[in-house]
Every structure is written in C-alpha cells, then in structure tokens.
Image: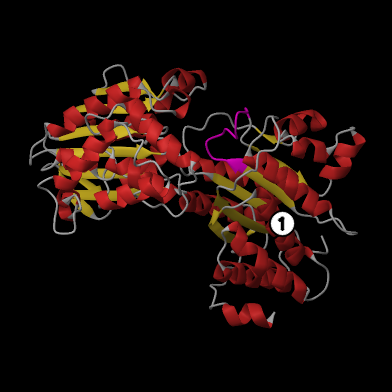
Amino acid sequence: MARVLSLSRSVHHWRPLWAGGPAAARVRRMSSLEERARVVFAAAVEGVQPDSVVRRGLQRRGDELLVDGRSFRLSNNLHLVGCGKAVLGMAAEAERIVGDHLVQGLISVPHGIQETLQHHGKQNMLLGSSSRIKVMEGAKHNLPDANAQKSAESIRELVSSLTERDLLLVLISGGGSALLPAPVPPITLQEKQDVTRRLAAAGATIQELNTVRRALSLLKGGGLARCAYPAQVVSLVLSDVIGDPLDLIASGPTVQSEVHPEEVWSILERYNLSVSLPSSVKEALNKSSSSQGEGESGKRTQDSTAGDHVLNSVIGSNTIALECAGRRARELGLRTVVLSPGVCGDVRTVARLYGLLSQYACSPGKEPPLELQEQILKVGPEAGVESWDLCRTMKLLEEGREEGWCATCLLAGGEPTVQLTGKGRGGRNQELALRVGLELSAGSMKNPAVFLSGGTDGQDGPTDAAGAVSDAELEAEAKNQGLDINSFLSNNDSFTFFSRLSDGRRLLLPGLTGTNVMDVHVMLLPPASE
C-alpha cells in the first residue's frame, strides 16, 4: 500500500453515529444489497429534480432575489426564457417562487414533452392554466428543426426588447442547443446543419465543432446575453456535461466566449471544407472578420457577457446527485466513498475498473495484492478517473477493511460510451451493468459486490429502462435460462437480455424523471468475510 499512501493526501475519516437503535433497525430491514442500491440511486435522482434544484438555487427574501450570494431587486421587472429537456419543470418551480413579479416568459422545450409529463403523472413539472410563461415545443428527435428555430427567434425578440431596469432569468439544461437554433443571416438552418454534419463526419473534435457552431449562431457562445444587454441576466444551469463547463452546456448562450474568424477558417480548411462552403456561410464569416466590433486581434468582442451584467450558476449536476446519494447511503448504514463524477471512456474499460476495485475491496487477507493497485492505477485514467481519485479511493477502501465495516457504497457518475457493433436494443448503462456482472463472476472466487448503473433521466438509449443491476450470480443465472451473454453483447442487445433474464427483475425502471445529469453508478461492497 506504500505507493497508494505516497500519492494520497490526508483523508477525512467518517465514522457512523450509531451502533444500534432505530437507524440500525432500519438497516436490518433492508432485505438485500440490491434493494439498498436501488434506494441510493433513487435518492440521487430525487436530489436533482428540476423543482428541487431551482428551490435550492433561487431564493426569495421579500422583494429580493438571491442567487449564489448575490441579490437582485424584484419590481415587476422579471422576464424568463429557457431551453432544454428539463426546463419545463424548472420554469414551473421558478414561477411558483417569483411569479408575482413575472412580466412574461417563453421557453423552448422538446416536442411532445408536455403530453409525456402528463402521461407520467408529473403534474409538478407542468405550468398552470394561468401561467405567464409561453411554452413552445420543437427539436423532434433531439434535432434542430423549424419549430425550434421559431422558438429561438421568439426568445431573441423578447430579450432584445429589455432595458437596464429589467431582470432576465434564463433556465438552461441539457438538450438546449438543439432547442435554440438561430443561424447568423443569411445562413439557413439547413446550411448550418450541413456544415457541422460534414465537419463531424470528417473527424472534427467537439471543441472544433463548438467553435464553428458559435461562429455561425446568433445566440450560442454568449449571444443570448448580448441580445439582452443592458438588462441584468441570471442564468440557472442544470448540467449534463462532465466537469460542468458552462460554455458547453447548451452551447453556452449566456457564457462569454471569443470568436476568432481566422480560427474558424483554419478549422474549415483543415478538413477541406473552406472551398465548398455555401456562399451564405462565407458571407457571414467575412462580415464577422470585418465588423466594427473587432479588436486588434480580429475577435468579435463580447463585453456584454462579462462582468456584473451576467451571473451563471450551476444549480444541478452529477456531483450534487452523488452527494444526495451519499447521504441516503449513510442513512442506510453504509460507508460512502465517491470515486469520481467524471467517469467516461469505453464501457469495457469502465467495467474492468469496477471489477478491479471490487476485488481490491473484497479480496481475502489483510492487504490487497500489490498488482491490483498497479492495475487500478493503469486502467483508471483510461476511464476518466484521475490518479489522485484512484489513490484516495483505494485508501478509503482499505480503511474500511481494517475498521470492519459491514458494507461500503462506492459512488461514481459520468457518461461512458459504447462501441456499436450490432443492431440490438440497449444503452450504455445496461451494457455496463452486464459487463460488470461478468467481471464480478470471473475467477475462482465469486465477488460478493452488487453493481447498479442508471441514467438519471430514466431512459437508457431507446429503451424503457434507466439501467440495470448485476452481481456475480448474473452469468450462472443467464446460463441456467439459456441466455448467451456474449451474443447479446456483440449485438448491443443488453435491454433484450435483461428483459428475458428472470422476467426483467434486474432492470431499473423508474420511468421518466424529468431531469438529466448523466449517469449514476452504485457499487455495494461487502467485506471479504461477508
């Protein structure tokens, strides 16, 4: 353990506040590790519901609005706009808090979302009949379309009419980029989509794609805040991106960014697209290069999105979901360890990491084998986990062994990827759970851990499940029922597998949640002797 200790800093020791009594009795009533894993996941989702995050982030004190320690005066001067998959629920709660000062509102939300929420009984996420907020639906299949563009134009018209006495509340969540398409004239929506599609097909990075998108948009990259100037802008953000980078969430409509026309041209030339660009795109880029707003560097100045004019606040994220999950786990008598909210990379690599960590925590003997530490430190960074987080996690897991804890709850989040090789039905969470199940059953001694992976939006890929639960019994259970795990994996058919296995008992089926902060992973690790 010397190598781990040398890389670790001092770690806060958390010990239970009970040895028996009512809390211990509640723990004993939990019938299984799987049941506890499901309860912990539910707490993560509940902690980032649109109404919950808005209540935490938007506080009221008389005629004052408090956000992130700053105060804003309310005097029938509030206007509201928003875009994203979770924005309808966010807007409903915001109106409940500050509706008496709301002049008008307009939100761009996914096609069919109101009917879907109604069907799932999510009345608290719907606006009342007397609401002053207009709802416009668009972006069918999560793609920008004419309806979304009409919504974006209406939002731009609303915010452009504001004055210095007005306060603009902007609500943003994942999916907002497709719901706020506003190409720079004379570019059409189809032309803008064609350019970005061709760039993506040519192998452009996400950073390069976003640079070009911002240059061709009126509202992305701080454009919405520029249009609202000189009004005060307060933006509340529900993050669905690893690390919560404000400029990437919904393409940052209220976040200052710098547009260098020469950089855009360089990207287009790099992928041999500069010559074949539509004339409208060339005209817009050339106009940007010669505009009066340029400084000596040739960049479009965006002073209206800097300083006190705009406040951006992340009110919901994967980190917050993990904090809520951790609190519930401790209530259940579990020792909580958070690995990272930024797990990413191929699901096969991520599954291998979880398999190694479970071996580390549950292997017999006083100390885990040194080779396990080395493998974890090698595989972890490939799954998006920093060496420091790996060392901290191993140190805490080892302390749990030494202190004789009944079970540890290892929490993580993020957004792994799946390499598509087949045409089955599934999603990254179900495939990850399936692959972790194989990892747990490998070797001569079956691992006693239980693993859950679920999408916080309640939908994993094109399926009705959010994810699934697995353990070391998964492989034997599948064989007894005539199911070949490898054939399902090769066809990316994890949903079909879990649906057929024991009548779908292992599926995670919370239904539509109305939020999205990526995925949550829960691994319950009993000690080796349990």
Does residue 13 belong to the magenta stretch?
A: no
Judged from this view, the residue extending furthest toward the front is 275
Range of magenta residues: 454-464
- Lateral position of residue 502 relative to residue 392, left or right: right
* Res. 423 in view: yes
Which residue is drawn at the image coordinates 88% and 59% (left, top)? Answer: 445
Q: Which residue is labeled 1 in the image?
A: 352
Q: Number of callouts in the render?
A: 1
Which residue is drawn at the image coordinates 34% and 44% (left, top)? Answer: 212
* Res. 64 in view: no
Task: Look at the image and tell me in which quarter the C terminus lies.
Answer: bottom right
Which residue is drawn at the image coordinates 58% and 70% (left, top)? Answer: 387
Q: Considering the whole magenta stretch, tell me its main secondary structure.
A: loop
Task: Look at the image and tell me in which quarter the N terminus lies.
Answer: bottom right
Q: Amino acid at mark 1?
A: Arg
Q: Position of residue 399 (x, y in %)?
A: 67, 72
Q: Which of the two residues, 148 or 158, is positioned nearer the viewer here?
A: 148
Describe the element under mark 1 as helix, strand or loop. helix
- Lateral position of residue 404 relative to residue 46, left or right: right
Give the color scheme: rainbow, by chain, secondary structure or one colour.
Answer: secondary structure
Q: Which of the two residues, 185 or 422, is positioned nearer the viewer here?
A: 185
Q: Which of the two residues, 435 or 217, is positioned nearer the viewer here?
A: 217
Q: Position of residue 54 (x, y in %)?
A: 35, 41
Q: Residues within 10 Å of mark 1 (few under 14, many from 20)?
A: many
Q: Position of residue 75 (x, y in %)?
A: 11, 37
Which residue is drawn at the image coordinates 46% and 36% (left, top)? Answer: 515
Q: Is residue 128 above or below residue 468?
A: above
Q: Position of residue 249 (x, y in %)?
A: 38, 44
Does residue 461 belong to the magenta stretch?
A: yes
Find residue 339 and report its image quarter. Answer: bottom right
